[in-house]
Image: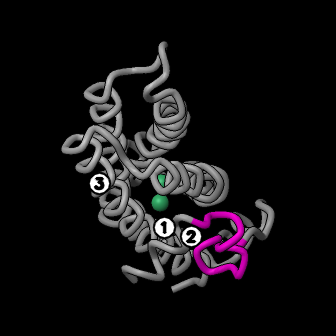
Amino acid sequence: MHESLLKLYRDHVHFFKLMDIFEVELDRLKQDGKTSNDLITEVVNYMRDYSDTIHHPIEDHLYQINLARTDDGREALEQLLVHHQAIMNMTREFRLAIEQLGKPNGLSIDEVEKLGRDYLDHQRSHMTFEEEKAFPLLVEQLDPEDFDYASGALPADQDPLLAPGLQERYPALHSYLQKHG
Ligand SMILES: [Fe+2]
Ligand SMILES: [Fe+2]
């Protein structure tokens, strides 16, 4: 399997893990009426900075190449391209909601929780759908040069979870991962 596709799978492993943390924080929000704002904000920032900015655009390139070449899996890939846009908007919306929580014009805890649950469901089902439908299609249809092209079209930004700067960029997430693995 091409290294770029292996990276996409590895990203998903990280994203699933982060979504588990996100879920714990949402449960806490529901139970206690508060959350560790730093942690949930950093998880969402990470998803914005890495998933929405690097991971999804690489997938977009791969899906577009596939779509240009064959009608196989067209419906699934077109849906996934739409998901990427929707998820980006949901990331932005949830980030704002958490920032405004407790402020006079902010959403209620129930409303924030609902946004969070929708976000979680979308992220998880999106990744599962990709792994079941899209990634096997890419393996079948694309050549190594296509993967090189798609990953080369984006800046070579490393997954922050693997980069040494995690502690500085995401201190709450870093300390959570140190404690909980
Ligand atoms: Fe995706
Ligand atoms: Fe993905």
The residue at 52%/71% (across/down) is 8
The residue at 34%/42% (across/down) is 34
Cα–Cα gap, marks 3 and 1:
31 Å
Instruction: Describe residue 129's horizontal placement relative to residue 141 as left or right.
Output: left
Q: Is residue 58 visible?
A: no
Figure quadrant of residue 146? bottom right
Looking at the rendering, the stretch of residues picked out in magenta corresponds to: 158-171
Density class for disc 1 (Cα within 10 Å; few <14, some 14-19, many ≥20) is some
Q: Which residue is mark 3?
A: 23
Instruction: Describe residue 118's horizontal placement relative to residue 82 as left or right.
Output: left
Figure quadrant of residue 17? bottom left
Rendered location of residue 14, percent (x, y): 45, 71
Q: Which residue is mark 2?
A: 142
Q: Earlier in the sequence, mark 2 or mark 3?
A: 3
Q: Are marks 1 and 2 in contact (CB under 8 Å)?
A: yes
Q: Earlier in the sequence, mark 3 or mark 1?
A: 3
Return the residue nearer the eye: 94 or 34.
34
- Quadrant position of the C terminus in the picture: bottom left
Q: Which residue is mark 1?
A: 138
* Depicted 39 relative to depicted 33: above or below: below
Rendered location of residue 176, percent (x, y): 45, 72
Cα–Cα gap, marks 2 and 3:
35 Å
Kind of residue at disc 3? Glu
* Depicted 48 relative to depicted 136: above or below: above
Q: Residue 66 — which label?
A: none
Kind of residue at disc 1? Leu
Cα–Cα gap, marks 1 and 2:
5 Å
Rendered location of residue 26, percent (x, y): 29, 47
Foreground mark, 3 or 1, reads 3
Q: Regarding mark 1 in the picture, which secondary structure is present there?
A: helix
Kind of residue at disc 2? Leu
Question: Is residue 164 one of those drawn in magenta?
Answer: yes
